[in-house]
Amino acid sequence: MTPVAEDLILKAKETLEQAEVILKAGVPMVAARQAYMAAFHAAQALIHDRDGKVPKTHSGVQQQFARLALADAALGEDMGRFLSRAYDYKDIADYRTDRTVTPAEAGDVIAKAKDFVSRIESRLK
């Protein structure tokens, strides 16, 4: 694992911890956003480990990660799709006024992000 990838995995784990604290504090929209960010940082770690650099935009990371996930049977298409679907929670928290996030939705995306981060970390060792 490259030092940059290691730092990004650590950031992903810290962000997941924040998501759980925020959910317990009763702010599911922000908790769900943090879950996406944890997955985003884990995806960046894998991209850096495999390609030596990371795209600068969310859409660039999503596209590059989806490509890598398709090529790695241990990750697969579902993980590639999760990152772009989870981005919806960032979009809701940052920009939208017509939608909120329930505690159940936040709990679900946090659980999926934990699995996402764990599976990527196992691919980097």
Image: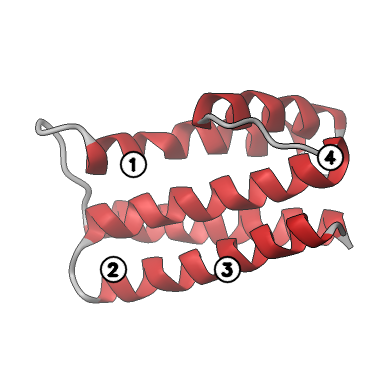
Camera-side mark, 3 or 1: 3
Q: Which of marks 3 and 2 precedes in the sequence? A: 3
Q: Considering only order in the chain, which callout, 1 or 4, is on the residue closer to the N terminus?
A: 4
Residue denoted by label 4: 52
Q: Residue drawn at (74%, 53%), measured in percent from left and top?
A: 120
Q: Quadrant of residue 110?
A: bottom left
Query: CA separation, marks 2 and 3?
Result: 15 Å
Q: Would you say 64 lies left or right of 40 here?
A: right
The answer to the question of whether label 2 and label 1 lie on touching residues, with beta carbons closer than 8 A, is no
Mark 3 is surrounded, within 10 Å at the Cα level, by few (under 14), some (14 to 19) or many (20 or more) other residues, namely many
Relative placement, left or right, of 22 versus 76 is left
Q: Which comes sooner in the sequence, label 2 or label 4?
A: 2
- Amino acid type at mark 4: Gly
Amino acid at pointer 1: Tyr
Crowding at mark 2 (Cα within 10 Å: few <14, some 14-19, many 20+):
many
Q: Nearer the viewer, mark 2 or mark 4?
A: 4
Q: Is residue 48 above or below residue 8?
A: above
Distance, label 4 to label 1, CA atoms, is 28 Å
Which residue matches tag 3? 13
Residue occupying image coordinates x 52% and y 56%: 38
- Asked which secondary structure carries label 1, the reply is helix
Q: Any mark on residue 23, and which?
A: 2
Q: Is residue 42 visible?
A: yes
Q: Amino acid at mark 2?
A: Leu
The quadrant of the rendering that contains the C terminus is bottom right
- The image quadrant where one finds the N terminus is bottom right
Which residue is identified by label 1? 89
Instruction: Identify which residue, 97 or 85, lies in the foreground.
Output: 97
